[in-house]
Amino acid sequence: MGTTVSSGSRRSAVPEINVTPLVDVVLVLLIIFMVVTPQMESGEPVDLPSILFPDEEGRGKLDPIELTLTADGRFLLRKEAIAEADLEERLRALHQAQPDRRVVLRADEKVAYGALRGLFGMCERIGFAGVSLLVAESPANTPEDFAPERT
């Protein structure tokens, strides 16, 4: 008694790919990029002075040129360190290339007012359309804190 096995009845093994480890790795990488990216964009850490009533108006037509003055007196133009002697020349070149751009000053709250006012004056002399001071909104104070007392 012989049994014959036909080749059509045998099934070949079908390989399957387990994608679970791949998905785990991709999710971990996504979380890492979500945490690291905001830190890379923030630039030099400065403690901004705070205000109670921020402007409702958003950005202008063109993104502003960001100029940072740190607590230790260093200047950063677009998050790139620059010597104070080269600052005015670089700002003039940027203004000539795009005269409609504004300047946003980020200064640590410990910076002397005179130094900050000097930067305002320099930007006005160059001819920038607008110079703004970047501040943080103060969450601790409410409008009632500044209301006059009634008796």
Image (spheres, grey):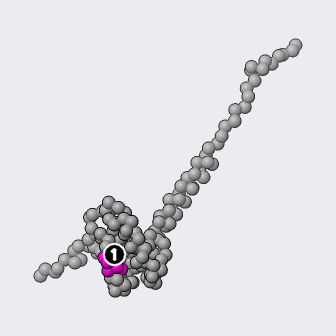
Amino acid identity at mark 1: Ile
Residue 89 percent coordinates (x, y): 42, 76
Q: Quadrant of residue 9?
A: top right
Residue 38 percent coordinates (x, y): 47, 64
Q: Quadrant of residue 94?
A: bottom left
* Residue that extends furthest to the left in the rendered view of this protein: 151
Q: Residues within 10 Å of mark 1 (few under 14, many from 20)?
A: some
Can you say whether 144 is above or below 98 in the image?
below
Q: The N terminus lies in which quarter of the figure?
A: top right
Identify the residue shown where x is 50% and y is 66%. 40
Residue 107 percent coordinates (x, y): 39, 78
Query: Quick check: 136 left or right of 75?
Result: left
Identify the residue shown where x is 39% and y is 65%. 97
* Residue 45 visible to the viewer: no
Query: Quick check: 23 left or right of 102?
Result: right
Secondary structure beneath dot 1 equals helix
Identify the residue shown where x is 78% and y is 20%. 7
Q: Return the residue at label 1.
A: 126
* Residue 8 visible to the viewer: yes
Q: The C terminus lies in which quarter of the figure?
A: bottom left
* Count of marks, rendered view: 1
Which portion, as a residue range, is magenta? 119-126
Is 125 colored magenta in this rendering? Answer: yes
Q: Quadrant of residue 19?
A: top right
Nearest the viewer among 14 and 110 is: 110
Identify the residue shown where x is 73% and y is 28%. 12
